[in-house]
Amino acid sequence: MDSRIKALLSEQQITLKYDELDCGGLYVDKLNWIIVDNRLNEHEQEKVILHELGHAAKQKGLSNLYNATTALHTKMEAEANRFMIREELENYRSEYDESELSPVKFLESFGLPLAFEPYVSKVLSELV
């Protein structure tokens, strides 16, 4: 696992667990746990961990709102996705020359939908 992910888990005092799940992973707010499907490859596990860290970092104590309405659920998922993308972009940016940075290449290499392209472009412009 990437050292920056370990640092984020440590900073938030989150316990990471692995098990067979029907989803990629989940954040258990009351226990401060992230549980990841152990059948995912390492790259997919890291994406899931970063997404769940987004829930922990941005929504701690708000788990009761997660299923309150479809709108809140969608908003919270989008916020966790943005957290994951920003963290992945930090790493991506450090591996490439500024002239080689491409939102589409980033999304394709990380297996993310092209619908995130406007957000990725915005974050890259902030980071460069």
Image (cartoon, rainbow, N blue to C red):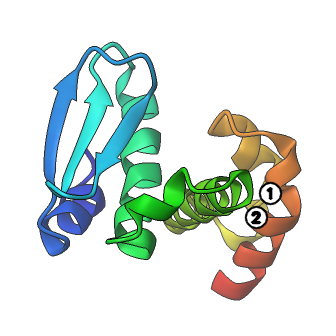
Q: Nearer the viewer, mark 1 or mark 2?
A: 2
Residue drawn where x is 39% and y is 19% of the image: 40
Q: Tell me if residue 59 comes above or below residue 18 in the rendering.
A: below
Question: Which residue, as the protein is rendered here, is positioned at the far front?
Answer: 68
| Position in image of residue 127 (x %, y %) | 64, 83
Residue drawn where x is 27% and y is 19% of the image: 38
Task: Judge whether residue 79 can be spotted in this image.
Answer: yes
Q: Is disc 1 surrounded by few (<14), some (14 to 19) or many (20+) residues within 10 Å? A: many
Residue drawn where x is 80% and y is 57% of the image: 103
CB within 8 Å, label 1 to label 2: yes
Q: Quadrant of the N terminus?
A: top left
Direction from residue 14 to residue 108 in the image, left or right: right
Direction from residue 43 to residue 119 in the image, left or right: right
Task: Judge whether residue 95 can be spotted in this image.
Answer: no
Q: Which mark is residue 23?
A: none
Direction from residue 116 to residue 2 in the image, left or right: left
Q: Amino acid at mark 1?
A: Pro
Q: Earlier in the sequence, mark 1 or mark 2?
A: 1
SS of the residue under disc 1: helix
| Position in image of residue 34 (x %, y %) | 25, 45
Seen from the viewer's position, the closer of residues 106 and 75 is 75
SS of the residue under disc 2: helix
Q: Amino acid at mark 2?
A: Val
On the image, numbered disc 1 is attached to which residue? Answer: 103
Q: How many marks?
A: 2
Mark 1 and mark 2: Cα distance apart in space: 6 Å
Q: Tell me if residue 82 comes above or below residue 110 in the rendering.
A: below
Q: Quadrant of the C terminus?
A: bottom right
| Position in image of residue 112 (x %, y %) | 70, 39
On the image, numbered disc 2 is attached to which residue? Answer: 120
| Position in image of residue 51 (x %, y %) | 47, 51
Question: For residue 73, what is the image quadrant?
Answer: bottom right
